Image (cartoon, helix red, strand yellow):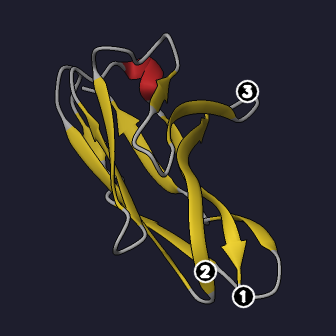
Amino acid sequence: QVYVAESGGDLVQPGGSLRLSCAASGGIFNMYTMAWYRRAPGNQRELVAAITSGGDTNYADLVKGRFTISRDSAKNTVSLQMNSLKPEDTAVYYCNAKGRGVLRNFDAWGQGTQVTVSS
């Protein structure tokens, strides 16, 4: 079974920066896409950024130019550097990992980490 764990959520002032980290472990044969999603109160979970095994990235329009996703494929980790944070970035951020396990494909989620942007 594949486990995913996020860290780095915190309270930050508008205009500030924060870096989220995520590590996947357990029976991973090949990691495909790693991504960050978020869910704000009253909203559905939405894609923030994704990165493929080849390094191709995809960002939500609302975060383009402010957030940067990166990964270490050797360690099965992914990070999200968030700059120029806005109150509307407040949400629980979830890490998602898709790949091939020892026996089957997996689509694993972490428990989430809270990011609050407020003065």
**Figure quadrant of residue 32:** bottom right
Q: Judge whether 50 appears above or below 6 on screen.
A: above
Q: Which residue is mark 3?
A: 43
Q: Earlier in the sequence, mark 2 or mark 3?
A: 2
Q: Which residue is mark 2?
A: 29
Q: Residues within 10 Å of mark 1 (few under 14, many from 20)?
A: few
Q: Which mark is residue 49?
A: none
Say which residue appears at 23% left-offset and 42% top-offset. Answer: 18
Q: Position of residue 22 (x, y in %)?
A: 42, 63
**Figure quadrant of residue 74:** bottom left
For badge 1, the amino acid type reads: Val
**Figure quadrant of residue 64:** top left
Q: Which residue is mark 1?
A: 102
Q: Judge whether 11 appears above or below 96 on screen.
A: above
Circles 2 and 1, Cβ within 8 Å, touching? The answer is yes
Q: Earlier in the sequence, mark 2 or mark 1?
A: 2
Q: Earlier in the sequence, mark 3 or mark 1?
A: 3
Q: Judge whether 110 appears above or below 35 on screen.
A: below
In the foreground, 18 or 61: 61
For badge 3, the amino acid type reads: Asn
- Observer able to see residue 99: yes
Outermost residue on the left side: it is 16
